[in-house]
Amino acid sequence: MTELEQRRRAVQTALAGHKVDALLVSSLANVRYLTGYAGSNGLALVTPFETHFFTDPRYALEASQSITCKLHIAKGPLQEAVAGIVKRKKLKKIGFEPAWLNLEQHQKLKDLLPLGASLQPVPGVVENLRMTKSPEEIDQIRKSVRVNSEAYARTLRRVRLGMRERDIAAELDYQMRLHGAEKPAFDTIVAAGAHSALPHAHPTGQRLEENDLLLIDMGACLDGYMSDMTRMAFLGIPTKRVRTLYDAVLEAQMTAIEAVRPGVTAARVDGAAREVLKRHGLDRQFVHSTGHGLGLEIHEGPRIGKKDKTVLRAGMVITIEPGAYIDRLGGVRIEDTVLVTANGCEVLTPTTKEFVHL
């Protein structure tokens, strides 16, 4: 049995527990996880004994060569084709992904279903499976991480005073693609000086100046799998205040990594980072969660946050990325991609966390 077939079998097994006859999968990441399809228009209908995949004629050739479940090329709306299978198979209770089916789509599908068939919200079935990565997925993430780190290293050697934030972002994206990535995993963040105090800053025309902090948050998408890393640099010699800020965030990040192991909750890892920053008087400057899962999407479960009670398991891949942000001074965030192992964790990111002085 292939890995894709094993995943579909796991969803089929879950159907009975949710008391539905089928699950309509509309999240494209979930569709890809179950079928291997990487296009922009696809649905999957998982029943207890088979999986049906629906797409349009643009993807007919590609799908016929790669899809290993029952394939349907719909000349009209995909939902009409789904409703046709529901009628033919006499399915009654159809589970759907509430996070991925908007109100208009829900109403349209409801109207198309045969008499006696109903829609039932069934959240998180595929996402829960995706949280634990297979050895093949972990290998893909490792490759993505290496591409990302290589792109960063090559770009950093080109950074000079006077460069614009968006020039650096463009070079990072170019280097990722040059080394095999299909695209960035998200919009690359490059923030200099006081601009780095914005956790999700967008690169601008602002030019690097002497004594600027430089925050780079980047990730690569390689064969569908994501990586994520944040590193800091400084243009010149950092002041004691900046150095102290960096050291505090680094201590928080390393402490959180040490807390990562099977059986520990995501909230406990988050708390480990917060305890350190609180000791340094920076807890109020830490305004986001400590990390998140990643894989086919850049943000997946579990969320490494205050209230997430998810118990970590071997095979999960998460980020650890505490930060502290001070208005008019700047922000510091340090982030690695981390694999939960049987005995603890492995930091996949090879890039040094030394505070680079440019």
Image: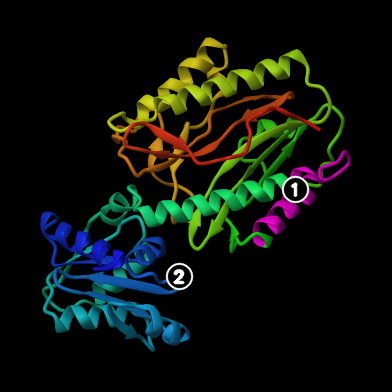
| Residue 268 shows in the view | yes
Question: Depth check: 23 or 157 in front?
Answer: 157
* Residue 149 appears left or right of 31: right
- Residue 232: x and y in percent read 68, 33
Say the numbered circle drawn on residue 336: none
- Residue 158: x and y in percent read 81, 46
* Residue 310 appears left or right of 75: left
Who's the residue at 36% across and 53% down the image?
135
* Residue 125 appears left or right of 184: left
Who's the residue at 50% across and 16% down the image?
276
Q: Amino acid at mark 2?
A: Ala
Of the 4 image quadrants, the one containing the N terminus is bottom left
Q: Amino acid at mark 1?
A: Thr
**How would you classify the magenta stretch by its main secondary structure?**
helix
Who's the residue at 21% across and 59% down the image?
10
Does residue 8 belong to the magenta stretch?
no
Q: Determine the secondary structure under disc 1.
A: helix
Pointer 2 residue: 38
- The range drawn in magenta is 154-177
Pointer 1 residue: 155
Q: Residues within 10 Å of mark 1 (few under 14, many from 20)?
A: some
- Residue 321: x and y in percent read 53, 33
Who's the residue at 65% across and 22% down the image?
246
| Residue 203 shows in the view | no
Q: CA distance from mark 1 to mark 2?
A: 29 Å
